[in-house]
Image (cartoon, rainbow, N blue to C red):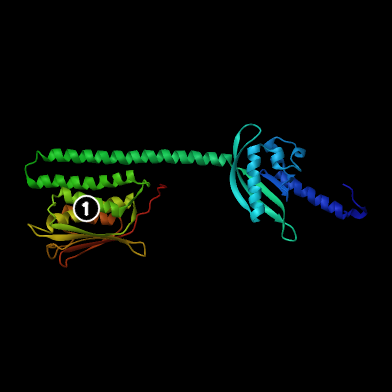
């Protein structure tokens, strides 16, 4: 390096030193870096650019992409250059190119305009990062998740089928029972199993493998209960006010049991003889994100003085246990029938699906 006496450099030498430092810095960057003039000719390139295409610097500098790169890649480069030159804004995109080794690679590229002192676009700078490994990892993850989804769907399908088999076995076994109370116990077990099987059926049919739209589940469950309890004459009507509420399987399963027990009790006990009436089922999410589930009938009502905590009914005992499982609260009202109001929040799951 030539220096003047006293160790001071000339303005030209200071510029050359700065320029050399910038070039050294650009060369140290592992990403492809290049600078083009306003006519799209390459003016500065780094080592990564040269290595990527197996060309000498003199075969690239001063050239248009069409003069030194493969035709398909040059055409893509021209298109993105023209977007930046036309909009005057940075442009980020992904592209695929084949190197001199014949290997296809994925790049994430950003191109940006460089303006002169008059605000006109004088140059264009570009940086391309090789994201092939990232893309391969992403594709491997997507494949693994797809395989996991298929597996979980199959599990839900098999669980549902197994529960249906259990329900059928209970139905066959009940034919050997003589006492009506024993037969009813078997039928109650069948209804509970069906309420669980329905959740797995909906999960199998859903895009999500861990969440279901609970209002749709309730509608299907109500029709199953109507049919299984032989109330087909129309003397007991349903009224529903159900908002769309998504629930995780950890919350949906106990809630499904609760709906099954409360509606079954109303169908069996609220309307003795030929009494006609209505069962109301409501579901809504409050602004504080709590969920309110209501099951109400206008039947004969619970006997006075009944304490839910000590009521000698397996169904209601199961309800109280499940309410505790989801950290909810439930109250019973006895005005013109029976009304149960359950308030709870969704249990949080760590499932990624």
Residue 287 falls left or right of residue 137: left
In this view, the residue farthest toward the bottom is 335
Q: Where is residue 213 in the image (x, y as percent from the top left)?
A: 32, 52
Quick one: 341 or 299, which is closer to the camera?
299
Considering the numbered disc 1 on the image, is that residue within a helix, a strand or a loop? helix
* Residue at (40, 48) in percent of width and height: 351
Q: Position of residue 298 (x, y in %)?
A: 15, 63
* Residue at (11, 60) in percent of width and height: 276
Q: Residues within 10 Å of mark 1 (few under 14, many from 20)?
A: some
Residue 186 falls left or right of residue 129: left
- Residue 240 lies, with reference to residue 350, above or below; the image says below
In this view, the residue farthest toward the top is 101
Q: Position of residue 296 (x, y in %)?
A: 20, 61
Quick one: 248 or 143, which is closer to the camera?
143
The residue under label 1 is 222
Number of marks in the rendered image: 1
* Residue at (9, 57) in percent of width and height: 272
- Residue 53 lies, with reference to residue 323, above or below; the image says above
Residue 16 falls left or right of residue 204: right
- Image-quadrant location for residue 316: bottom left
């Amino acid at each position: 390096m030539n220096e003047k006496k006293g160790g001071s450099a000339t303005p030209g030498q200071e510029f050359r030193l700065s320029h050399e430092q910038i070039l050294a810095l650009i060369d140290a960057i592992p990403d492809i870096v290049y600078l083009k003039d306003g006519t799209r000719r390459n003016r500065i390139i780094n080592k990564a650019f040269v290595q990527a295409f197996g060309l000498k610097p003199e075969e690239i500098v001063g050239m248009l992409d069409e003069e030194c790169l493969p035709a398909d890649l040059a055409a893509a480069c021209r298109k993105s250059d023209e977007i930046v030159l036309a909009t005057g804004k940075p442009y980020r995109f992904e592209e695929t190119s084949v190197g001199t080794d014949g290997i296809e690679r994925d790049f994430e590229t950003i191109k940006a305009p460089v303006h002169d002192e008059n605000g006109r676009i004088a140059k264009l700078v570009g940086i391309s990062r090789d994201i092939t490994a990232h893309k391969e990892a992403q594709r491997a993850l997507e494949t693994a998740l797809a395989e996991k989804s298929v597996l979980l769907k199959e599990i839900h399908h098999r669980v549902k089928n197994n529960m249906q088999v259990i329900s059928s076995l209970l139905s066959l076994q009940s034919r050997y029972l003589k006492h009506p109370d024993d037969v009813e116990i078997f039928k109650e077990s069948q209804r509970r199993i069906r309420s669980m099987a329905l959740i797995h059926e909906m999960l199998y049919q859903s895009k999500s493998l861990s969440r279901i739209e609970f209002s749709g589940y309730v509608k299907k469950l109500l029709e199953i209960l109507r049919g299984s309890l032989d109330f087909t004459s129309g003397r007991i009507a349903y009224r529903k006010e159900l908002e769309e509420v998504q629930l995780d399987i950890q919350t949906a399963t106990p809630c499904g049991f609760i709906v099954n027990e409360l509606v079954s009790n109303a169908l069996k006990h609220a309307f003795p003889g030929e009494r006609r009436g209505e069962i109301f089922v409501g579901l809504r999410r409050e602004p504080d994100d709590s969920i309110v589930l209501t099951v109400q009938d206008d039947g004969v009502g619970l006997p006075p003085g009944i304490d839910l905590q000590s009521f000698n009914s397996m169904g209601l005992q199961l309800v109280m246990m499940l309410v505790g499982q989801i950290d909810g609260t439930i109250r019973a009202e006895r005005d013109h029938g029976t009304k149960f109001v359950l308030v709870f929040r969704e249990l949080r799951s760590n499932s990624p699906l």
